[in-house]
Structure formats: C-alpha cells, structure tokens
Amino acid sequence: MVTTGLLLALAGVASAVTLAGIGSAIGVSIVGKAASGVVTEDPDKFGKTLTLQVLPGTQGIYGFLIGFLIVQKLNLLSGRIPEVSFESGLGLLIAALPIAIVGLLSAIIQGQVAAAGISIIAKKPDELVKAMIYAVMVEFYAILALLISFLAFNGVPV
C-alpha cells in the first residue's frame, strides 16, 4: 500500500532530481550559447569553452545523487512498495530541498558567470583558469547544499 510517507519521500526524489536538473540544463545552455559565438570565430577555443560549459552541469549530478540515495534508502529497486512513515517521508522531502533549490538557482547563476568567462577566453585564451575560478566560486554553495542534503538524509530513519 502506498503511504503518505512514501509519497512525500518520492516528492523529495522528484524535487532533487528535477529542479537541480532543470537548473543545470539552463546553466549549460547559457554557457553553450556564449561559447558558440567564440568557437565560430576561433574553432581552436572549443576545448577551453567546453571546460566552462560543463561546470553548471554538476548541480544536476548532485540532485541525482541525493535522489538516488533516497531511492536506495527506501529499497525501491527491490520491486516491493515499502511502508514509509509520514515523519520519515517528510524528513526525506526536507532533506532533498537544499540541493533541489540551491541546485536550481546556483546552476543558472553559475551558467551566467561561466558565460562571462567565455568573453575572457575570447579575448585572452590563456586566462581560462581565472574564468574557471569565478565560476567555481558559485559551485561552492552547491557543494554546501549537497552536504546539508546528505547529512539530513542520513539523519532520517526509514
């Protein structure tokens, strides 16, 4: 029987994977659009621009990781419907929210910062590291959200 707790836990899975994934897709597309113009002018800059483009994709990976951990904790891959208390389901939903929300927003913002870094690469290709540092500063907050989601997830008994 499907319980309210299970539905809440699945809402946590869906929010972590979906919101962080949407943010990553938007962030990666922002950088890709900026990089396309640079690569049109100088195809040799593809590798450097690609390095910046992949950065906003990590938030989607973080959201997927938390979603996968919740699925594993619930033993959903066994083919049986687990009984999950309301409290545990709510706890798992709340545990997923930091990476869901911060993942969504930070990936978009990181995409904007990385797109600005693309303009650095366009004019000074040897300054890739500086452009990456700007973008990685945003990543730090996504990592903190991942850590909080992970710690909260571990604190929820099922």
Image (cartoon, helix red, strand yellow):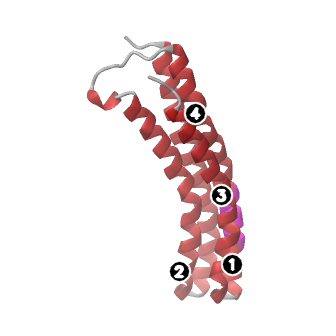
Question: Residue 135's image quarter?
Answer: bottom right
Secondary structure beneath disc 2? helix
Q: Which residue is mark 4?
A: 95
Q: Earlier in the sequence, mark 4 or mark 1?
A: 4
Marks 4 and 3, Cα distance to the nearest angstrom?
A: 19 Å
Secondary structure beneath disc 3? helix
Marks 1 and 2, Cα distance to the nearest angstrom?
A: 17 Å
Q: Which residue is mark 3?
A: 140
How far from the left and from the top, in percent, is residue 131? 68, 75
Q: Observer-nearest residue: 27 or 102?
A: 102
**So how many labels did they put on this image?**
4
Mark number for residue 46? 2
Whether residue 114 appears in magenta in the rendering, the answer is: yes
Marks 1 and 3, Cα distance to the nearest angstrom?
A: 16 Å
Residue pictured at 53% horizontal, 41% vertical = 150
Amino acid bearing label 1: Lys
Other residues around mark 3 within 10 Å, as few (<14) / some (14–19) / many (≥20): few
Q: Which residue is mark 1?
A: 130
Q: Earlier in the sequence, mark 4 or mark 2?
A: 2
